[in-house]
Each structure stands twice: as structure tokens, then as C-alpha cells.
């Protein structure tokens, strides 16, 4: 899997279609999580590919929410993104807004972790620390069971994602908490620059 674009070019492309700080922060979070997973799962040499796919996965969502994953290929092609990465981006909407099934390990991780970062991020904001650094697995398990909490984060997608990977939910939760810890500080710094 080859990366046809630098990280800086990818971030510029994202910002061309996304202005909302919430969407930028989500993109940066999924990028950081994907980079952590690439290294954790033995795909370190593909870290840029995993990360940039994470960064761009929702490129069309802010402007074209009704056409999510349908509009993305056009925007990504205009930005010089290769077909492999376009396929990977579209696969994260499988069964919701895309019929492209996640096949590669990276696509399965993106599918599973995307929704989960939203749930963990929302849970972190409820903590006195506002951070994932002191987040416990039991806390996420409780929030996951409470359907009213972060209701927009699909529990079905998260469960399906764990199943696709052949993991227990707890393993997906634990790993994704660690992944979010690894990039929390750098995302805060990047968001401060973005919001200035």
C-alpha cells in the first residue's frame, strides 16, 4: 500500500473541505490512532498510509453529509490520492453509506476504531481531567452499555468492527484507549494552532 501524498498535503486537502474544529479534531484523532495501530500490529512501514487514510476518512462529511463516502472519491482524486487509499477511505462506511467491505487489516481497524474514538472522546470530556490518560477500561464498558451516552456512536458498528478483527470488545477498547493516549498531547497542540 503506497502513499501518494505527504502528510502536510493531506492535511491541506482535509482543511479545504473541513472548517469545523470538531471535524478537524476527529480527523487528527483517527490519524493518530491509526498510526499507533500500524506500529502495534506490525505494519510500521505503512504507518504513513494508515495515518493519512485516518486523517482523510471523513473528508466529505462536513460539506456532503448525505453523500458520505459517495463524494469522497471525487474529492480525493482531485487531491492526488491513489485508488488504494480511496478504497480504504470508502470501506469505513461499509453497510451504512458504502458497499465496499473492509478487507485489509488497516481497513478493519479504521472501521472499528472510527466510531469508538467518538465514544472514548466523549467519555474523556466527562472526566475531571478531560483526558484519556487516566481513562479506565471499566469506564468505557459502562458508557458503551449506556445507549443514551454519545448516542450518535453506533454500538453495532463498534461490535461489528471488533468481530471483523477477531477481537473481544475489551481488547478493542483497551487498544484504542492506548492509541488515543499516544496522540492526545500532539492533537491538543495542533488544535491550538488551528484555532488561532
Image (cartoon, rainbow, N blue to C red):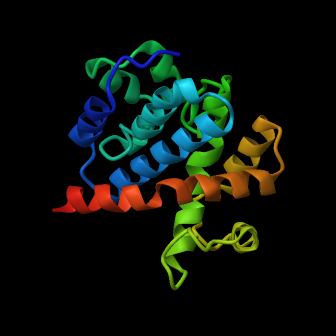
Name the foreground residue: 124 vs 86: 124
Please, is residue 28 above or below residue 100 in the view?
below
Residue sticking out furthest to the bottom: 128
Q: Quadrant of residue 154?
A: bottom right
- The answer to whether 38 appears left or right of 13 in the picture is right
Q: Residue at x 55, y 81 (%)?
A: 127
Q: Residue at x 34, y 40 (%)?
A: 64
Name the foreground residue: 137 vs 99: 137
Q: Position of residue 59 (x, y in %)?
A: 36, 38
Q: Residue at x 71, y 57 (%)?
A: 173
Name the foreground residue: 159 vs 10: 10
Please, is residue 83 above or below residue 22 in the view?
above
Residue 29 visible from this viewpoint: yes
Q: Position of residue 133 (x, y in %)?
A: 56, 69
Name the foreground residue: 115 vs 121: 121
Q: Quadrant of residue 7?
A: top left
Q: Residue at x 65, y 25 (%)?
A: 101
Please, is residue 58 above or below residue 1 in the view?
below
- The answer to whether 126 appears left or right of 7 in the picture is right
Q: Count the marks: how many?
A: 0
Q: Position of residue 38 (x, y in %)?
A: 59, 34
Name the quadrant of the C terminus: bottom left
Residue sticking out furthest to the left: 196
Q: Position of residue 65 (x, y in %)?
A: 39, 44
Q: Quadrant of residue 177?
A: bottom right
Amino acid at each position: 500500500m503506497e502513499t501518494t501524498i505527504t502528510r502536510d498535503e493531506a492535511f491541506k486537502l482535509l482543511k479545504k473541505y473541513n472548517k469545523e474544529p470538531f471535524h478537524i479534531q476527529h480527523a487528527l484523532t483517527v490519524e493518530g490512532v491509526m498510526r499507533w495501530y500500524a506500529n502495534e500490529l506490525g505494519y510500521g512501514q505503512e504507518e504513513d498510509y494508515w495515518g493519512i487514510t485516518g486523517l482523510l476518512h471523513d473528508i466529505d462529511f462536513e460539506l456532503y453529509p448525505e453523500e458520505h463516502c459517495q463524494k469522497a472519491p471525487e474529492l480525493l482524486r482531485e487531491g492526488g490520492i491513489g485508488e488504494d487509499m480511496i478504497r480504504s477511505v470508502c470501506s469505513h462506511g461499509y453497510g451504512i453509506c458504502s458497499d465496499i467491505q473492509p478487507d485489509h487489516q488497516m481497513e478493519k481497524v479504521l472501521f472499528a476504531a472510527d466510531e469508538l474514538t467518538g465514544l472514548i472522546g466523549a467519555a474523556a470530556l466527562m472526566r475531571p481531567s478531560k483526558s484519556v490518560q487516566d481513562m479506565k477500561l471499566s469506564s468505557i464498558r459502562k458508557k458503551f452499555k449506556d445507549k443514551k451516552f454519545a448516542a450518535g456512536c453506533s454500538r453495532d458498528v463498534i461490535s461489528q468492527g471488533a468481530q471483523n478483527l477477531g477481537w473481544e470488545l475489551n481488547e478493542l477498547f483497551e487498544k484504542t484507549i492506548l492509541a488515543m493516549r499516544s496522540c492526545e498531547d500532539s492533537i491538543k497542540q495542533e488544535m491550538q494552532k488551528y484555532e488561532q
